[in-house]
Image (cartoon, rainbow, N blue to C red):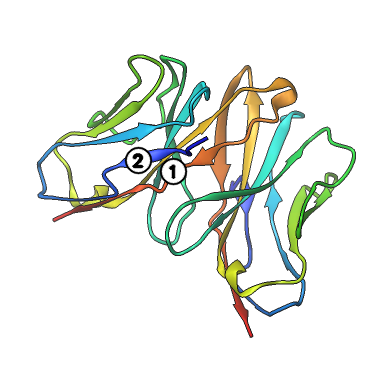
Amino acid sequence: AQKITQTQPGMFVQEKEAVTLDCTYDTSDPSYGLFWYKQPSSGEMIFLIYQGSYDQQNATEGRYSLNFQKARKSANLVISASQLGDSAMYFCAMREGRGGSYIPTFGRGTSLIVHP
Amino acid sequence: DTGVSQDPRHKITKRGQNVTFRCDPISEHNRLYWYRQTLGQGPEFLTYFQNEAQLEKSRLLSDRFSAERPKGSFSTLEIQRTEQGDSAMYLCASSRTSAGGRETQYFGPGTRLLVL
């Protein structure tokens, strides 16, 4: 079974609008962390936001927020006020704690295109 | 922080040749990760180090792949007897262990390998 599922291969959004990128995950480990990364065409993975499984509040970082619904095992990324520079691939990732050995798993990504 | 650096950025080789990639992590980061990313996929975990110790290497794709981090600073990833299927982007990331598991990985620009 896929540990991280990103069901949207591609998304389009108009500049200045908000967009939600979906991510669902599967784990039986009570301790885990969820991450979102952005990968522009240059190839470098850029860290955006982190949510811990025990965090009580949804994470926010500037224009990025994470809609964390633990019971539904979803961790959707919300980008507010989209900019042209937000066009990129976006990856959701999970790291489970297994006795101190952290092995991250990434989803297949969502391609976001922001148009004027 | 000067960021994670990787060398070379691009490598073209002939099938059967050996290649070695280098990764220099962010200073003071004790963990270092190697990933492979093929077209249309998210990064696939290969191995990671905590200081000099290689704590997880079962995900290395075959015995042709090996990694070292001899002094707990930079790391090398070697692929012996390259095959066309090894063509991919090889990403390195580093992180610092932190309390509560809020460890964030920072990625380098990657090394793009093409095996002819």
Please indicate whether residue B12 sits to the left or right of residue B100 in the image: left
Q: Is residue A61 above or below residue A11?
A: above
Q: CA distance from mark 1 to mark 2?
A: 6 Å
Q: Dot 2, crowdedness within 10 Å: few (<14), some or many (≥20)?
A: many
Q: What amino acid does circle 1 point to?
A: Gly
Can you tell which mark lies on residue B108?
1
Callout 1: SS:
loop
User: What is the chain identity of the residue bearing mark 1?
Assistant: B
Residue at the location (62% across, 68% down)?
A: A8
Callout 2: SS:
strand
Q: Dot 1, crowdedness within 10 Å: few (<14), some or many (≥20)?
A: many
User: What is the chain identity of the residue bearing mark 2?
Assistant: B
Residue nearer the viewer, B43 or B4: B4
Q: State the image coordinates of residue A3 (x, y, percent, origin top left).
A: 61, 45
Please indicate whether residue A55 sits to the left or right of residue A6 in the image: right
Q: What amino acid does circle 2 point to?
A: Gln
Can you tell which mark lies on residue A92?
none
Q: State the image coordinates of residue A36 (x, y, percent, origin top left).
A: 64, 50
Q: State the image coordinates of residue B71 (x, y, percent, origin top left).
A: 36, 14
Can you tell which mark lies on residue B6?
2
Of callouts 1 and 2, the N-terminal one: 2
Farthest residue in the bottom direction?
A: A116
Residue at the location (11% across, 48% down)?
A: B15
Q: Can residue B84 be seen by looking at this rendering?
A: yes
Residue at the location (25% across, 47% down)?
A: B86
Q: Kindly indicate the quadrant of the structure image that contains residue B67.
A: top left
Please indicate whether residue B58 sits to the left or right of residue A32 in the image: left
